[in-house]
Image: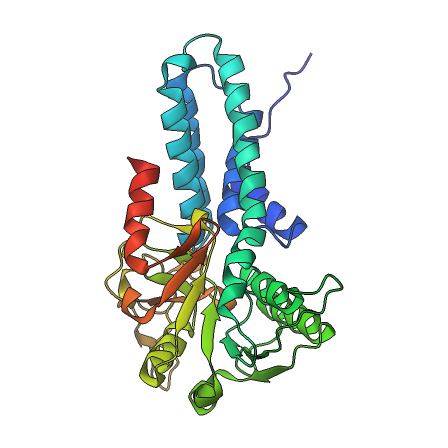
């Protein structure tokens, strides 16, 4: 009888499938779910084997996704959760039972992380008052939830008593339709359905309309150790313009996006984006952000809507999370609570 071969678990494919099946899933949560599926489907009989398995799967996932900043927050958090629980005295005994308990608790964490968006919207709606004009760069599910919550506040029929306006910054013309654009379109339609006036502008018009703006709200792919954020390309430019105009700039993010990264500038994100490419008439890249030549990078190159920039904490007035509203300086304290 021929021996049956077991197909090895493909964490990158699992991660991509989870994101495509559930549009509301954030990248860190999808990464955690992928690791949980890997734990459930791959045999490991000891604590050491389990930790080694999670470490290997994490490395495979980070290597397979060009922009791994956001998902790193989830994988690091899950690894710390495992280490903390497996080192407890109660972890001694039947390992299969312990492993099953860890997987169940991991799934409970995922459910709580998904529910964080509603709590954030509850905190954030108080920053929007009657007559305000809000500027956002779109594509963020949690910012969309906050704005819808503010639009519905004070009225159980979906139309609240607070009247405000929203300006959405769209993608540059000629970039094509992306998943972020679809999310933006859905948020705009939901707000207009609730009688909230919404305008759409290109990125080149941010400075022009800044004098009419009351406050800015943006999402984040990752909130780094010093309280700065990594977010979609163009967020830094909006923050600089808001600071120059004296407008408050708020970040709306789940706490599971807090990531152990300390960039000092745009070149310290650890990913290859090539936002700036120098070419000659022959089309050869003379120099890129990392000094690479044309043809290097391959699958590790970040393209399209996945490109991000870093906004320093000095431009951020507050970070609205499910645990409350934090100053940028408080992010390091929250990370210390998680890791130590």
**Horizontal side of residue 1 vs 261, given as left or right:** right
Residues 169 and 177: in front is: 169
| Above or below for 26 versus 59 | below
| Above or below for 43 versus 190 | above
Please, which residue is most extreme toward the left here?
A: 264
Please, which residue is most extreme toward the right here?
A: 157
Could you tell me which residue is drawn at 41 percent across and 28 percent down?
82
| Above or below for 323 versus 4 | below
Residue 300 pos. (x, y %): 42, 56
Quarter holding residue 320: bottom left
Asked whether residue 154 appears in the rendered view, the answer is: yes
Residue 75 pos. (x, y %): 43, 40
Residue 234 pos. (x, y %): 42, 75
**Horizontal side of residue 188 vs 203, given as left or right:** right
Asked whether residue 52 appears in the rendered view, the answer is: no
Please, which residue is most extreme toward the bottom here?
A: 208
């Amino acid at each position: 009888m021929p021996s049956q071969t077991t197909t090895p678990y493909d964490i990158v494919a699992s991660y991509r499938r989870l994101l495509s099946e559930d549009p509301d899933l954030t990248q860190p949560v999808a990464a955690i779910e992928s690791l949980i599926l890997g734990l459930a489907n791959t045999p490991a009989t000891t604590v050491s084997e389990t930790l080694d398995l999670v470490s290997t799967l994490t490395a495979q996932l980070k290597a397979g996704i060009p922009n791994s900043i956001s998902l790193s927050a989830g994988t690091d958090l899950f690894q710390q959760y495992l280490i903390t629980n497996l080192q407890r005295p109660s972890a001694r005994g039947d390992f299969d039972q312990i492993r099953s308990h860890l997987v169940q608790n991991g799934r409970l964490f995922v459910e709580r992380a998904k529910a964080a968006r509603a709590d954030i919207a509850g905190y954030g709606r108080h920053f929007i008052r009657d007559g305000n004009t809000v500027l956002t760069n779109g594509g963020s599910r949690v910012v969309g939830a906050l704005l819808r919550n503010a639009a519905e506040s004070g009225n159980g029929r979906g139309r609240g008593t607070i009247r405000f306006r929203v300006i959405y910054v769209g993608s540059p013309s000629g970039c094509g339709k992306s998943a972020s654009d679809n999310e933006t379109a859905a948020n705009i339609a939901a707000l207009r359905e609730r009688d909230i006036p919404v305008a759409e502008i290109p990125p080149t018009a941010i400075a022009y309309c800044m004098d009419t703006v009351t406050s800015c709200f943006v999402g984040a792919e990752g909130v780094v150790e010093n309280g700065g954020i990594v977010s979609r390309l163009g967020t830094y430019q909006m923050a600089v313009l808001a600071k120059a105009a004296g407008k408050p700039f708020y970040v709306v993010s789940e706490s599971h996006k807090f990531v152990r990264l300390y960039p000092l500038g745009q070149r310290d994100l650890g990913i290859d984006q090539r936002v700036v490419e120098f070419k000659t008439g022959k089309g050869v890249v003379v120099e890129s952000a990392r000094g690479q030549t044309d043809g290097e990078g391959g699958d590790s190159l970040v393209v399209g809507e996945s490109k991000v920039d870093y906004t320093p904490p000095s431009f951020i007035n507050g970070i609205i999370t499910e645990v409350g509203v934090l100053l940028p300086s408080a992010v390091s304290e929250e990370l210390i609570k998680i890791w130590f």
